[in-house]
């Protein structure tokens, strides 16, 4: 179902739980195996679309664009920036005001692997803050803090970039995926995020891709992704 364009693996599992899928006239259950060629598979009463070719696109999301396949509040979405004959979904999320690397794909299994906390894939960010942090602030960021809503952040890598000029940029590497984690960690430590750019996700790098631009993954990146998928 995920490869046929019905959402991520988790979304497809939820559709099955809701009883919206039948196989040869019988309500489908999680774990049931079916062949879209020889079996009659219906989703909400409609025949399952033919399996679409797996597509992987790396996008530089600009600020003011939603990391979603559906618009909310009139904001543009990442999928609107990409020309693709198949329906794509973003892997992971970036806040509306954040920028940087977003992977778009119709590979639901891979999306699940890259976003599930148990896999611990690294995500690296450049973070512009309002002041140079102290060593104590950096130490606490690395060790983890308790946020205002009582969530606890795990260990992270955090260091100050060299050649700062007048702008204190941090590098932050996370394996956690809490909502607004970097912004709220900074606020807990008395810092304010002025700009946030994701530059790496696992082995994928943003490189010099301009905001709003996108490209299909290279053969080497595909090999790395398949390795992550098979780990």
Image (spheres, rainbow, N blue to C red):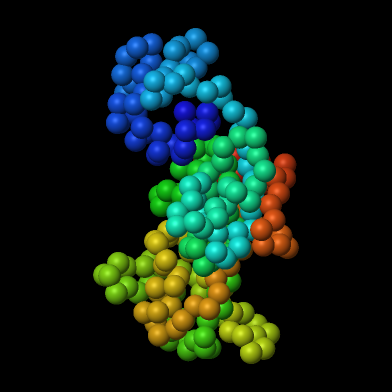
- Residue situated in front as seen by the camera: 172 or 54: 54
Residue at 30 percent across and 31 percent down: it is 17
Where residue 145 appears, x then y in whole percent? 35, 74
The residue sitting at the front extreme is 74
Image position of 87 with respect to 20: above or below: below
The residue sitting at the left extreme is 150
Where residue 31 appears, x then y in whole percent? 36, 25
- Residue situated in front as seen by the camera: 142 or 128: 128
* 126 with respect to 26 (left or right): right
Residue at 42 percent across and 48 percent down: it is 116
Residue at 47 percent across and 28 percent down: it is 1
Q: How many marks?
A: 0
Where residue 3 appears, x then y in whole percent? 53, 31
Residue at 54 percent across and 53 percent down: it is 77
Q: Residue 20 appears in which quarter of the rendering?
A: top left
- Residue situated in front as seen by the camera: 211 or 205: 211
Where residue 36 appears, x then y in whole percent? 50, 17
- Residue situated in front as seen by the camera: 50 or 202: 50
Q: Residue 199 appears in which quarter of the rendering?
A: bottom right
Image position of 192 with respect to 157: above or below: below
Q: Is residue 91 in sight in this rendering? A: no
Q: Is residue 118 in sight in this rendering? A: yes
* 202 with respect to 115 (left or right): right
Q: Residue 152 appears in which quarter of the rendering?
A: bottom left
């Amino acid at each position: 179902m995920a490869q046929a364009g019905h959402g991520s693996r988790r979304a497809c599992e939820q559709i099955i739980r809701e009883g919206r899928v039948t196989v040869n006239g019988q309500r489908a259950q999680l774990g049931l195996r079916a062949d879209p060629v020889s079996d009659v598979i219906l989703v909400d009463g409609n025949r399952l679309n033919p399996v679409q070719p797996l597509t992987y696109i790396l996008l530089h999301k600009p600020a003011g664009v939603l990391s979603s396949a559906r618009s909310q509040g009139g904001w543009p979405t990442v999928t609107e920036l990409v020309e693709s004959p198949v329906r794509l979904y973003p892997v992971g999320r970036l806040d509306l005001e954040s920028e940087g690397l977003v992977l778009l794909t119709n590979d639901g299994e891979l999306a699940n692997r890259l976003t599930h906390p148990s896999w611990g894939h690294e995500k690296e960010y450049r973070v512009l803050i309002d002041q140079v942090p102290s060593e104590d602030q950096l130490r606490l960021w690395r060790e983890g803090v308790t946020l205002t809503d009582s969530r606890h952040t795990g260990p992270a890598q955090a260091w100050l970039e060299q050649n700062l000029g007048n702008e204190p940029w941090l590098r932050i590497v996370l394996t956690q995926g809490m909502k607004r984690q970097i912004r709220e960690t900074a606020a807990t430590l008395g810092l304010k995020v002025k700009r946030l750019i994701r530059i790496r996700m696992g082995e994928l790098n943003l490189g010099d891709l301009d905001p709003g631009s996108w490209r299909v993954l290279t053969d080497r990146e595909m090999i790395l992704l398949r390795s992550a998928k098979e780990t």
